[in-house]
Amino acid sequence: MQAARGTSVATRRLSLLFAGVAGTAYAVDQVSKVLAVEHLTGRDDNVPVVGDLLTLHLVYNPGAAFSAGTGITPVISVVAILATLGVLWFARRIGDRVWAVALGLLLAGVVGNLTDRLLRDPGFLRGHVVDFLRLPNWPVFNVADICINIAAGLIIVQALRGVRLDGTRDRDHEPDRSGDRPDDQSDDQPAPVEGRSE
């Protein structure tokens, strides 16, 4: 009973962490886009934030990452809806803090850009995503894109560490063969027989 209660508390905490990360990152993305549209509309110049390293420049992206697929915005929107449902489905099995953060950021990023495609011009499922962050020699991006990329990095790290979504490790599922035979008994030596004298 005590173990089940502890597991329930841990699961609830991970769910709250997932929801908190997703909600916070989504809010930052949406607020930053509203501010970008409000303050950068009509400006053709780059607004420096960190010298020429990071500048602000408002663009509307009808496609996916790096402006790919600009002619199939409705398809990208449907894929984003399916991705959102997929993240929510897998989030039910979270058993690790890093996975909770990764899936929370992934959900925030996917839903952040999906919100633009659903609600912004030119219309439902065809809306253009607000991008406004620019690095040298890099396509303009937004906070949602940052969330998706950080999430991808964390997922790769977890895969390399062998940590599964439920918090178990790959080695936890390997059979334990240490008890097959005593360590000090080799294949080519017979076991000693008690009571035998030479």
Image (tube, rainbow, N blue to C red):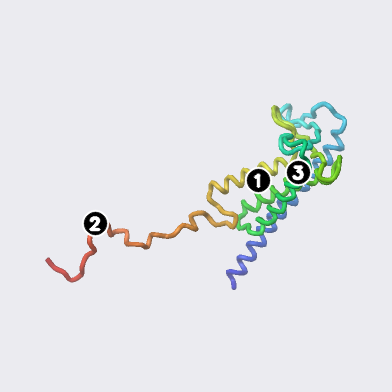
Q: Residue at x 69, y 43 (%)?
A: 148
Using the rendered image of the protein, determine whether residue 25 is visible from the camera's viewpoint.
no
Disc 3 marks which residue? 75
Position of 131 relative to 1 (above/below)? above
Label 2 Cα crowd, 10 Å radius (few <14 / some 14-19 / many 20+) = few
Q: Which of the 4 image quadrants contains residue 48?
A: top right
Q: Secondary structure at mark 1?
A: helix
Q: Is residue 52 left or right of residue 188?
A: right
Can you tell which mark lies on residue 55? none
Of badges 1 and 3, nearer the viewer stands 3
Disc 1 marks which residue? 151
Q: Which of the 4 image quadrants contains residue 57?
A: top right
Q: Quadrant of the C terminus?
A: bottom left
Q: Secondary structure at mark 2?
A: loop
Residue 45: x %, y % from top left: 82, 26
Residue 62: x %, y % from top left: 79, 37
In the rendered structure, which amino acid carries the disc numbered 1?
A: Ala
Q: Quadrant of the N terminus?
A: bottom right
Cα–Cα gap, marks 1 and 3: 23 Å
Q: Which badge, 1 or 3, comes first in the chain's sequence? A: 3
Disc 2 marks which residue? 188
Cα–Cα gap, marks 2 and 1: 53 Å
Cα–Cα gap, marks 2 and 3: 66 Å
| Camera-nearest residue between 34 and 106 | 106
Using the rendered image of the protein, determine whether residue 42 is visible from the camera's viewpoint.
yes
Residue 102: x %, y % from top left: 65, 49
Q: Which badge, 2 or 1, comes first in the chain's sequence? A: 1
In the rendered structure, which amino acid carries the disc numbered 3?
A: Val
Label 1 Cα crowd, 10 Å radius (few <14 / some 14-19 / many 20+) = many
Q: Does the residue at mark 1 contact the one at mark 3 (Cβ under 8 Å)?
A: no
Hey, which residue is sitting farthest bottom in the picture?
Answer: 1
